[in-house]
Amino acid sequence: MDNAPKDKDIEENKMLAAIGYVWILCLIPLFLKRDSKFAQFHAKQGLILFVLELIGWLIFWIPLIGWLLFVAVIILAVMGIMNAIQGRYWEMPVLGKYAKKINL
């Protein structure tokens, strides 16, 4: 019974957590689900990816670097979506620690 509130948060917010990895849609759980630790965790990581996507669009014209950044962001987003839907807290390699520092 001790995990009941945590489990309820995860079950109720899986889809919003997954949406958090889709470009600017990360703002939806960031602002609509402030009370959900699960949705906030994934939305903050999605926000980091969104910023990287914007940078990627700016440097996409640089051969290889822009393309590699774009592919890396897509892979991380897909992994984040899959973990959110499965109800897991998954910290992105390297970037996850920066997401934890975001306070909104």
Image: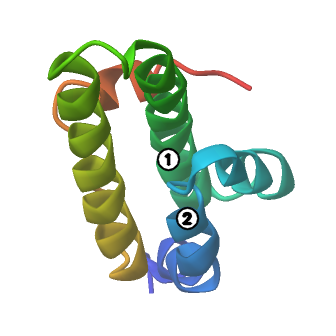
Q: Residues within 10 Å of mark 1 (few under 14, many from 20)?
A: many
Q: In the image, which is nearer the foreground, mark 2 or mark 1?
A: 2
Amino acid type, label 1: Phe
Amino acid type, label 2: Ala
Residue 97: name its quadrant. top left
Q: Please tell me which residue is depicted at 65% across the width and 49% down the height of the picture.
A: 26
Q: Earlier in the sequence, mark 2 or mark 1?
A: 2
**In the figure, 44 relative to 35: above or below?**
above
Q: Which residue in the protein does label 1 denote? A: 41
Q: Please tell me which residue is depicted at 51% across the width and 75% down the height of the picture.
A: 10
Q: Please tell me which residue is depicted at 58% across the width and 83% down the height of the picture.
A: 8
Which of the pair 62/9 is nearer the observer?
Answer: 62
**In the figure, 55 relative to 95: above or below?**
above
Which of the pair 25/98 is nearer the observer?
Answer: 25
- Image location of residue 79, percent across then percent down: 25, 62
Taking the image as shown, residue 45 lies to the left or right of residue 91, namely right
Q: What is the quadrant of the N terminus in the image?
A: bottom left
Taking the image as shown, residue 3 lies to the left or right of residue 19, namely left
Which of the pair 65/45 is nearer the observer?
Answer: 65
Q: Which residue in the protein does label 2 denote? A: 17
